[in-house]
Amino acid sequence: MTPLQSERRSGIVVFEDADPQATFNKLKSLNIIVASRVKAIRVSPHYYNTEEEIDKLLAAL
């Protein structure tokens, strides 16, 4: 759902999810902080996130 156009990019990533609340709860139980949106999950990685944290998120998804 995140725009692909370079002029509309940001550090926020939003992707569709069939059951965003279940995904949110699963990630929360793993201490991965995201936001549940209507039909989507919002991830806001930042410069202070480590590669290991990003890998943990991707593995959990």
Image: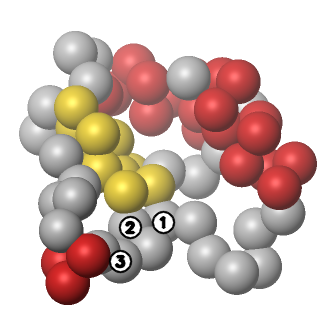
Residue drawn at 48 percent across, 65 percent down: 44
Quadrant for residue 21, please give it. top left
Image position, residue 46 (x, y; %) = 62, 76
Q: Are marks 2 and 1 in contact (CB under 8 Å)?
A: yes
The front one of 30 and 3 is 3
Where is residue 5 drawn, in percent x and y?
A: 18, 68
Check contact, mark 2 vs mark 3: CB within 8 A. Answer: yes
Say which residue label 3 marks. 10
- Report which residue position mark 2 lands on: 12
Inter-mark Cα distance, 2 to 3: 5 Å
- How far is disc 2 from disc 1 in space, using C-alphas? 5 Å
Identity of the amino acid at label 3? Ser
* 54 in relation to 19, above or below: below
User: Does dot 2 land on a helix, a strand or a loop?
Assistant: loop
First-in-chain label (1 vs 3):
3
Quick one: quadrant of the C terminus? top right
Q: Nearer the viewer, residue 30 or 47?
A: 47
Percent x, y for residue 57? Answer: 66, 38
Above or below, 6 relative to 2: below
Type of the residue with mark 1: Ser
Please give left or right for residue 15 compared with residue 26 in the image. Answer: left
**Quadrant assignment, res 39:** top left
> Label 3: how many residues lie within 10 Å, few (<14), some (14-19) or many (20+)?
few
Q: Please give the label number shown on residue 7.
A: none
Q: Secondary structure at mark 3?
A: loop
Q: Amino acid at mark 2?
A: Ile
**Residues at marks 1 and 3 touching, judged by CB atoms closer than 8 Å:** no
Horizontal side, residue 46 vs residue 54: left or right:
left
